[in-house]
């Protein structure tokens, strides 16, 4: 059983109450606790030594990544983060200076986005460091973006460059909070998600939630320098296109807008590129990729935590 | 460095913003997000295989315990829980039916208290199961109870019976949510905490936050049947009094009220006993224990996750 099959089984009949606007299955849970104009966004995310970072990773970057991943999910719903709690599960022996450096990286990113670190807890995980962040944010009731809003004919856009994140970007990426809010306030964005499982995997989440399909233009997909370099230098590496489609942890935004809006979108926001990579189609769950001389179906395959990583 | 020393170092200069009413150092973080009459309570807590439960523990009870611990912290501030997120870090191989049973135990307790399970995530922790809960609740602005409100002369009360929780109660305890809310609405409660580190350890947290001391009457401390039995059957066991003072994971409430209120408190609420065990004194941090024929100082020592457990 893989991660997604297990999650499907576990989330079939979860307890709900009237506060829940969106439960399991979007980037964040969305709660209405009685604020007149705003909804709460609620998210948790963990990074584990040996899975999401190597034992050699600089501690500041581990802290940065742990918080940035959660911020990226708040961004995906066009929200503003408020406060985080930190769960630090430490091996039996640890260096206090190392742990402090993890916090330094996390605190610096929190300050940059005016997020409070409001506490948390420490516990023991004997074999390896695990760092879990719980994050609260808010979003205007009429500006909250979901995975489920994509419509047949929508233009599909991504921010930044994709693929090859494991070469280093996954430890130091900047969550697209300001860009997402600006997009939500300025255009009729229909759906949004952040790219953690890889373009193909996350696009598939949008398609499933929206009951639509997609056609991607291969030569429009922005491929990172790292993905191109890896393909050039290592004969066993993925092709640059495959890396951009399937590598995890880009933490860029994917969003869809009604086609009339597409030409009005700028090429860049705050130095971050925005690029149309295809359009939504009516065939549920189907992803077609158009290359110069052929069109092929992209089969389901994404980044799965339960499969060993390369 | 032990858990509390590390936490002291890490929480010295955390990022804050105007939403934070109470940050690190109480049972929950307290946030003001603009609700007219209520504050948000925000809490995370993790249980780890081999630390908080054995590999032989019934999975339903693991799920129950994980959520109950967080609910107990919401209770300690007289709050009402709203919604939880579940972080499930699974070993490389796991039984789906086991994980579903963990959720069954958690979901049953959530339904009992009208708490929504609004999502979460799964990840990998290769050697052992780790289950972390993030919980949101609310509390009326004028009813939120803190560790810091104890005053010289206050009567100190506890609910239930203390000590010997590891014999089984730690897996199936009921968080004292209704009892705490009733107490906060009915009496002038000055301070409250839930007993997770042991009576002595948690009382010390109240004393530190409130800059006061305490005198306990040894024969007033309600000692559990398990603690008495262990002392009778095992020559190496703690005395019943020491077990009640220092065993962790009772998850009962400790609270202080102004002395005039003490005689008005009932002996029981909803079948849970309430008992005065001593009073607050003016000497900061000092805990004295009065026995029939002697008075002694209780030195700092509590349940510490970084020390191996018996």
Image (cartoon, coloured by chain):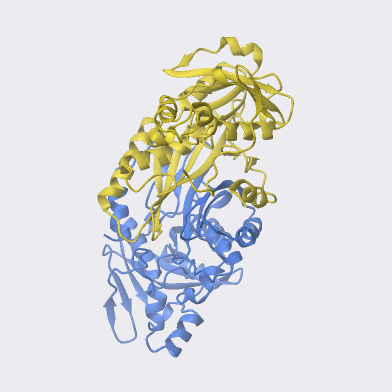
Chain colours: A yellow, B blue
Seen from the viewer's position, the closer of residues A232 and B117 is A232
Against B130, residue A147 (above or below) is above
- Residue A302 at x, y = what percent? 57, 38
Viewer-proximal residue among A178 and B99: B99
Pick whichever, B284 or B114, lies toward us.
Answer: B114
Q: Can the viewer see residue B141 in this picture?
A: no
Q: Identify which residue, A212 or B252, lies in the foreground.
A: A212
**Percent of width and height locating residue A10:** 64, 52
Residue drawn at (27%, 78%) of the image: B296
Question: In the figure, residue B260 lies in which quadrant?
Answer: bottom left
How many callouts does the rendering have?
Answer: 0
Do we see residue A25 in this rendering? yes
Which residue in the rendered view is the most extreme toward the right? Answer: A283
Q: Percent from the top left, x then y, of residue A13?
A: 70, 51
- Whether residue A206 sits left or right of residue A130 in the image: it is right
Residue drawn at (58%, 16%) of the image? A187
User: Could you tell whether A251 is left or right of A261 in the image?
Assistant: left
Q: Position of residue A209 (x, y in %)?
A: 68, 34
- Relative to A12, is B102 on the left or the right? left
| Residue lying at 40% horizontally and 69% vertically, measured from the top left | B198
């Amino acid at each position: 059983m893989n991660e997604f099959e297990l999650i499907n089984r576990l989330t079939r009949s979860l307890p709900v109450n009237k506060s829940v606007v969106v439960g399991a299955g979007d980037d964040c849970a969305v709660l209405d606790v009685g604020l007149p104009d705003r909804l709460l966004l609620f998210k948790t995310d963990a990074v584990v030594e040996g899975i999401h970072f190597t034992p050699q990773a600089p501690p500041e970057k581990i802290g940065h990544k742990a918080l940035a991943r959660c911020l990226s999910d708040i961004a995906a719903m066009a929200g503003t983060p408020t406060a985080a709690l930190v769960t630090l599960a430490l091996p039996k022996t640890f260096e206090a200076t190392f742990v402090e450096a993890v916090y330094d990286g996390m605190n610096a990113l929190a300050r940059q986005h005016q997020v409070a670190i409001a506490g948390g807890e420490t516990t023991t995980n004997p074999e390896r460091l695990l760092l879990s962040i719980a994050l609260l944010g808010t979003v205007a009731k009429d500006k909250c973006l979901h995975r489920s809003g994509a419509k047949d004919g929508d233009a599909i856009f991504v921010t930044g460059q994709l693929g090859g994140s494991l070469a280093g970007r996954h430890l130091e990426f900047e969550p697209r909070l300001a860009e997402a809010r600006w997009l939500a306030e300025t255009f009729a964005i229909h759906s949004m998600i952040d790219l953690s499982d890889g373009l193909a995997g996350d696009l598939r989440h949008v398609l499933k939630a929206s009951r639509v399909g997609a056609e991607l233009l291969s030569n429009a997909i922005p491929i990172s320098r790292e993905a191109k370099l890896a393909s050039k230098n290592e004969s066993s590496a993925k092709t640059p296109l495959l890396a951009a489609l399937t590598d995890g942890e880009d933490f860029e935004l994917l969003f869809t807008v009604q086609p009339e809006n597409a030409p009005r979108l700028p090429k860049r926001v705050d130095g971050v590129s925005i690029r149309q990579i295809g359009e939504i189609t009516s065939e549920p769950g189907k992803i077609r990729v158009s290359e110069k001389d052929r069109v092929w179906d992209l089969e389901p395959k994404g980044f799965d935590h339960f499969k060993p990583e390369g």
